Amino acid sequence: SECYLNGTFQPLAQCQVSVLDRGFIFGDGVYEVIPVYGRRVFRVQEHLARLSRSLAAVGIKSPEQAGDWLSLVRELVARNAPDDQCVYIQVTRGVAKRDHAFPRGVEPTVFMMSFPFPHLQTEKRSQGLACITAPDLRWRNAHIKSISLLGNVLARQLSVENDAAETLLIRDGYLTEASASNVWIVRNGRLAAPPRDHDKLEGIRVGLLEELAAETGIALEFRPVAEWELRCADEILLTSATKEVVSVTTLDGRSVASGRPGTIGQSLYLAYQEAKR
Ligand code: PDD
């Protein structure tokens, strides 16, 4: 497939960056994952706005302007074959002699690639996912979409080792998010999600589900969600660029309510499919 590195489109297999890149040395960079359906980039303005916020939060001045990003993303999509893709964008602070402090006069490394959209198997979607919980041991700036993902990687691996699809993270008795998704619960017919704050990434699907819930008449509150509420929820949902909206049907080996995907998750999934058109 074709990728983009610092101004040039080229085959991914030949694309290389220096071992001194601060992304490699320090995890000093930010990223985005943007879904593309039928060659149309979904919610691209929201993703690019979040990229700008991440860059600003870590003090990286990317050479690309807001308008450039859009045409670069569109060109990348055009150069790659699948109708449904994911565009991955990564910007690091650049290549410099190893020193924790920001280097001077260094250009950021700008990298973009595309991969086929990893559609969830229909069977998995209709069964719902098995998930586990673990303590959220990550840093307190999880709202920045940073490439320093060791805490997320270790959390996700725990789920692999427990034959589960995701790890839901708990900090001080409250749900934050999952290793690579946002988490929602349904109790008494009402949808709830943890507050938007620095302990979690505000997914692009958070704003989208807020809109879809309003359109479909589902009550939604952003409020702290206690671990005990998670454990007796009527439904648990995950959202992310790649998972869209999916139900969690077992948590730590126990069924979530009936152990079948619930009706609110189903309504939001269908509304999401409509929004993609
Ligand atoms: N992950 N929280 C975390 C920690 C995430 O990594 C993600 C997305 C989300 C959901 O955000 P969005 O709705 O914008 O995808 C929440 C991406 C897909 C990834 O790292 O592959």
Image (cartoon, rainbow, N blue to C red):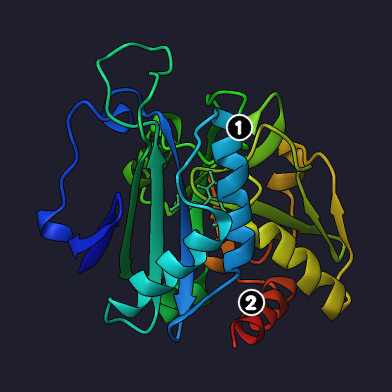
| Helix, strand or loop under label 1 | helix
User: Quadrant where the C terminus lies?
Assistant: bottom right
Q: Which amino acid does label 2 sit on?
A: Tyr
The three-letter code of the residue at mark 1 reads Ala
The residue to which callout 2 is attached is: 269
Q: Do the residues labelled 2 and 1 touch (CB within 8 Å)?
A: no
Is residue 65 at least partly visible in the picture? yes
Judge the density around disc 2: few (<14), some (14-19), many (≥20) Cα neighbours within 10 Å.
many
Residue 266 vs residue 162: left or right? Answer: right
- Comparing 40 with 215, the one in front is 40
Q: Which of 194 and 145 is in front in this view?
A: 145
Q: In which quarter of the image is the N terminus?
A: bottom left
Does the residue tagged 1 have its C-beta within 8 Å of any atom of ligand 1? no
Q: Where is residue 20 in the image (x, y as percent from the top left)?
A: 21, 25
Distance from the alpha carbon under mark 2 to that under mark 1: 32 Å
- Tell whether 78 sits left or right of 251: left
Q: Is residue 30 above or below residue 59?
A: below
Which label is found at residue 57? 1
